[in-house]
Amino acid sequence: MTKRLLVALGFASLAPALAAAQAPLGLLPQPPDSDARWAPIEAMKKKGPGLAAAFASHVHRNARGDAMPYRLYAPEQLAPGRRYPLVVFLHGAGGSGTDNKKQLEGANLFGALSWTLPENQARHPAFVLAPQSDVNWACVIVEEGKPARRPADLKWCPTGVLGPGAGLAFEIVDTLLEKLPIDRRRVYLTGHSMGGAGTWHMIAHRPGFFAAAVPVCGHPDSATAGTVASVPIWNFHGEKDDVEPVETSRRMIDALRTAGGHPRHTEYPGVGHNVFMWAYTEPALVEWLFAQKRKTSSAASVEARPHVRGLYGGVPQEILDSGRSLREFGLDAVWMGSGSFTPERMALLRAQGVRVYAEFNTLHVAEYLQEHPDAAPVGPDGRVSPPPDGWQGICPSHEAYRRSRMEAFRTLLRDFDVDGVWLDYHHTHASWEQAVPNLPDTCFCDRCLSRFQKDTGVTLPGAATAERARLLLSTHRQKWVRWRCDLLTDWVRELRAILDATRPGALLGTFHNPWSDEDLGGARIEKLAIDLKAQAAHVDVFSPMPYHARFGHHAEPEWISRQVAWLGRHLGIQGTPGEKHRIWPIVQISDWGEAVPLEQVPTVLDHGSRRPATGVMVFAWSGLRKQPEKIEAIGRAFRAMRGAAPRDR
Ligand SMILES: [Zn+2]
């Protein structure tokens, strides 16, 4: 018997209780320190070199010049048309390096090789991937001159920052999914120690991606418990672990259960940090792992997000100039201002294979006022309402203005083969894109007031505008609010008719304020005159604008999915394939007012892409072009969403 790191003290008295408590998990019944239980461990050590020889050697290189070696085991015989599970093993610190060997040797042989034992492959033929990292898996902060000697000394990056090792491992997995007959619903992740921490880390970045995870004596981040609660997890820890204390596992397991998860958790009494020897020699673990299969309908699954992945703000010239394609960043749609359309730009985007959507200014072409000052919105004092924070709206009942916009809309659709047009954005004279919005009451011009009386049958006294406005905002408030909403909805009706007549099949979308009916005292309807339910008769895609940082929710990206969820309930949109109405939010990634930190990018895109959303786009290229790290982070998140069928239009 080789060295035993068991603590003998008190073990005998614990053994019966252990066997009884763990029987439901089907663990080997012998006490960890018994000869019978050591036998499979010793056998595994002997078989290691022979098993490792069956792993092919590869090196992954990405477009940025980063490289990661990996070893890959393929089932002995691949049946045509059949797809196989993939087990991904993340080595512990002892496997670090670039020799492409150590991740299958020593302590690592258990987690890397046990799946390839002939008896296991006979029952569960599977691919096994063992990448090798020399920069950890999870994200840790390395201080110069002060290398961490123990896991307890490691400084972990803030939650949500993807580790460079994990990022490259994801790239390898994504590449293999494209090349090999792998069952995407049966991709498993495991690892011990540093690789156990990596396992917790990677499932937090793609909670719906892995069918199951087996972290062994790893360091979890309990802040991610809510994110990974739905992942089938079997966690292992040695009760006497003096490297990564068992308490970290216990806290995470508690947090997972509180969050509604059902993780398995096994502690071996008396066993230290080398718990992986016991864990990976449990036949029950093999059976349990291969029985796990991801449900394709999982709401948390990024692969179940057949998303439109868009960029707002025109041709991303810097990406194209660097010789890379938009597809490399997972992008499949671009929104461009209608004034920026040229045949050349259109051709450039089409050559990238992306869908092209125009944004169209409906109610705030400020220049129109230069020759038509009578189209300026009027305030309750009877005077022209100054543009709130410089945001100039136009009177919605000005017929000549409306005709000019309808004509511009028709021309855009006639001249350019766009996949759709988004109204940008259709609301009354107000500035709401900030934490404290500026929402003046308008428009009380003679034209609006006479049309209101005609449409509603309400008779206003022949008094000064101020008195009439007072009545509209008090006695007649309900009818006034309804009339304003109906007027804006009627614009949408006419725009839709033009779209259907000019370019049938193109989508009509709308960028709109993200508030619920309750937010800011119902101001979306009362002040902005946006009745989404009424507009749904004419609109295909709703694109709320939950700019969390800009709107005072910079530390609360959950606000994004909360507002989107509200919209789904409000409009009866579930985000299921084939629905007429869709929700594709535009989320803030560029810094505007408040900065959006780099590490928040995946979280923001996660919240922006949760059901009922079936598409998501980022705001905005004008700011992002100077932030290459963010563009890469967007690319990683978008690539993770890619690949799911069916695709939306
Ligand atoms: Zn007016």
Image: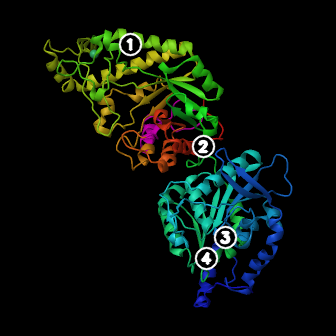
Q: Which comes sooner in the sequence, label 3 or label 1?
A: 3
Q: Amino acid at mark 4?
A: His
Quadrant where the image shows the N terminus: bottom right
Residue at the (76%, 46%) spot, across then down = 179
Q: Which mark is residue 125?
A: none
Q: How is the image coloured?
A: rainbow
Q: Position of residue 87 (x, y in %)?
A: 71, 59
Q: Which mark is residue 641?
A: 2
Pointer 1: what residue? 402
Q: In whole angstroms, how far apart are the C-alphas of marks 4 and 3? A: 13 Å
Asked if the residues shown at circle 3 and circle 2 are in contact, with their CB atoms under 8 angstroms apart, the answer is no
Q: Nearer the viewer, mark 4 or mark 3?
A: 3
Q: In whole angstroms, how far apart are the C-alphas of marks 1 and 2? A: 40 Å
Instruction: Say if disc 4 is inside 8 Å of ligand 1.
Output: no
Pointer 3: what residue? 94
Q: Which comes sooner in the sequence, label 4 or label 2?
A: 4
Q: Which mark is residue 273?
A: 4
Residue 130, compared with residue 582, is above or below; it is below
